[in-house]
Amino acid sequence: MTDAVEEDCPVCNSSEDAKAQFARANVAEHLKEKARRDEAHRAWINEHTSNGTLAEIRSALDEHNRPRH
Ligand SMILES: [Zn+2]
């Protein structure tokens, strides 16, 4: 039942620790899968990508995880 991916997901768990430990590929798939039924995940994808592909989600997570200077 425990889904470790959810702990790394920015929607399920927004703690700084989780953000620091992203397993990007898994989280991207998790976001895309959950977005089918969960509005918070869909909103995150809409906000961070233009067409919601896995590649775009991954790169959005990459930026999300890296502070801009
Ligand atoms: Zn999630």
Image: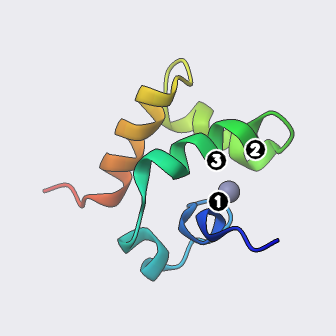
Residue sitting at x 64%, y 59%: 11
Numbered disc 3: secondary structure: helix
Instruction: Classify mark 3: residues with Cα within 10 Å, few (<14), some (14-19) or many (20+).
Output: some
Q: According to the image, label 1 marks what residue?
A: 11
Residue sitting at x 72%, y 38%: 33
Residue 37 percent across, percent down from the top left? 86, 39
Label 3 with label 2: CB-CB less than 8 Å = yes
Residue 19 quadrant? bottom left
Q: According to the image, label 2 marks what residue?
A: 34
The alpha-carbon separation of the residues under discs 3 and 1 comes to: 10 Å
Q: According to the image, label 3 marks what residue?
A: 30
Q: Is mark 2 within 8 Å of ligand 1?
A: yes
State which quarter of the image contains the C terminus.
Answer: bottom left
Residue sitting at the far top: 51
Q: Is mark 3 within 8 Å of ligand 1?
A: yes
Mark 1 residue type: Val
Numbered disc 2: secondary structure: helix
Residue sitting at x 35%, y 37%: 59
Q: Is mark 1 within 8 Å of ligand 1?
A: yes
Instruction: Classify mark 2: residues with Cα within 10 Å, few (<14), some (14-19) or many (20+).
Output: some
